[in-house]
Image (cartoon, grey):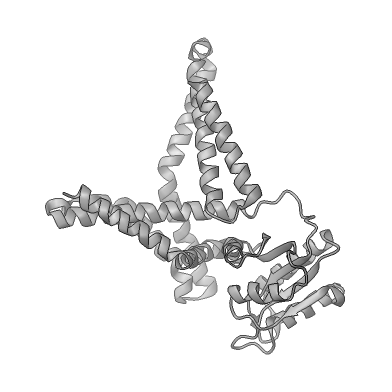
């Protein structure tokens, strides 16, 4: 049996590698990694089960394995509650540091909803006293499970697209996405993006640095121009900088930056804040731009809130697909609720 499990693991490993090499900019990267790890867990379980006779005479090793198993089970059981607490605490930090704007309430709202789903919702089985109540209960449960699974897959795919074994990519262009100014001053978040672009420029000596961003409300000049001035002050040769100063969104950042590239099929690196990289890559893929993404660091408490915002953007980008899944789940709820 373990031989079959090993074959499944090898197949899943090859599929994962194939996805990451050919086109990692989709949820397939996260799904394929999850199934690879699941197959690996199956192999390990069957190998250990097959070696039960050998383990029987090694009491100390058995106890070590049992303790590790108990720790793993406790972690799995506690993880959902720990996740809700973490989002709650970080949500309070976002509000304290960034203000009470609706966009800053996402972590807090998510933690409350997750806690309610884990603790209150299971106790609401009383809805099942009627056919409509049963169907509604099943539908909401299925939708919540789907969205949580989708969020986990999105987060895993986003992390995988941030992992790079080398910074030397023989890139033709490094596109740094704008992030707003305070008057004419580059913010710390935007400065981190530019610094990352400058760092990558040193590893890609033939690349041009495209600073992408138009002028928004409350800004004294275009973001691209301010970003270029910042890079020049940091010692970057002005001849290696191209300014894109018309864009007002990530889609336009990519579209207008691509129009400035002279090569027909250039090698492109996108640079933005880590939590924003995956959605930017998805948008670039929609526009047919072949690229990889590198993320600039930001404060941890802000990352969780921003990740939820990015996930909302992903749902908006792919809403037709998820609407179709919701219809399927509604049909399942109607059948199961009879």
Say which quarter of the image contains residue 322: bottom left
State whether residue 138 appears in this view.
no
Q: Is residue 224 visible?
A: yes
**Would residue 218 appear left or right of 69 to someone viewing this image?**
right
Q: Is residue 62 above or below residue 336?
A: above
Q: Is residue 46 left or right of residue 276?
A: left
Q: Is residue 41 left or right of residue 14?
A: left
Residue 81 location, x and y as percent?
40, 50
| Residue displayed at 52% across by 65% down | 310
Which residue shows up at 55% across the image and 55% down it? 26
Q: Quadrant of residue 136?
A: bottom left
Q: Residue 172 lies in what quarter of the image?
A: bottom right
Q: How many marks?
A: 0
Image coords of residue 23 (percent x, y): 62, 53
**How far across and down, in percent of the image, does residue 335 sit?**
21, 49
Work out whether residue 58 or residue 97 is closer to the camera in this orientation and state it: 58
Q: Is residue 296 above or below residue 47?
A: below
Estimate the x, y position of residue 92 in percent, counting from the top left: 47, 66
Q: Tell which residue pokes out farthest to the front in this image.
A: 264
- Residue extending furthest toward the left: 130
Please say if 316 is above or below 24: below
């Amino acid at each position: 049996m373990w031989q079959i499990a090993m074959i499944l693991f090898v197949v899943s490993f090859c599929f994962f590698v194939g996805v990451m090499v050919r086109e990692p900019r989709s949820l397939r990267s996260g799904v394929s990694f999850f199934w690879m790890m699941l197959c690996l867990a199956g192999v390990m379980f069957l190998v250990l089960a097959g070696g039960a006779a050998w383990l029987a005479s090694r009491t100390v090793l058995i106890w070590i394995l049992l303790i590790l198993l108990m720790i793993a089970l406790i972690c799995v059981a506690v993880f959902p509650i720990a996740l809700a607490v973490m989002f709650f605490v970080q949500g309070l930090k976002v509000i304290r540091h960034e203000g009470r704007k609706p966009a800053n309430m996402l972590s807090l709202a998510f933690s409350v909803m997750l806690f309610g789903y884990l603790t209150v919702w299971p106790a609401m089985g009383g809805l099942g006293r009627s056919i409509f109540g049963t169907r509604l209960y099943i539908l909401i449960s299925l939708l919540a499970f789907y969205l949580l699974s989708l969020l986990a897959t999105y987060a895993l795919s986003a992390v995988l697209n941030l992992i790079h074994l080398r910074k030397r990519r023989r890139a033709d262009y490094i596109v740094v996405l704008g992030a707003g100014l305070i008057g004419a001053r580059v913010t710390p978040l935007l400065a981190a993006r530019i610094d990352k672009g400058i760092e990558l420029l040193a590893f890609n000596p033939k690349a041009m640095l495209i600073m992408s961003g138009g002028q928004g409300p409350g800004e004294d000049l275009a973001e691209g121009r301010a970003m270029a001035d910042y890079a020049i002050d940091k010692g970057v040769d002005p001849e290696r900088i191209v300014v894109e100063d018309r864009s007002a969104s990530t889609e336009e950042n990519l579209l207008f930056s691509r129009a400035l590239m002279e090569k027909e099929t250039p090698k492109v690196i996108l640079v933005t804040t880590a939590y924003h990289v995956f959605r930017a890559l998805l948008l670039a893929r929609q526009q047919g731009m072949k690229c990889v993404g590198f993320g600039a660091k930001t404060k941890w408490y802000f990352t969780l809130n921003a990740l939820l915002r990015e996930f909302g953007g992903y749902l908006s980008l792919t809403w037709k697909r998820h609407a179709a899944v919701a219809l399927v789940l509604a049909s399942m709820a109607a059948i199961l609720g009879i």
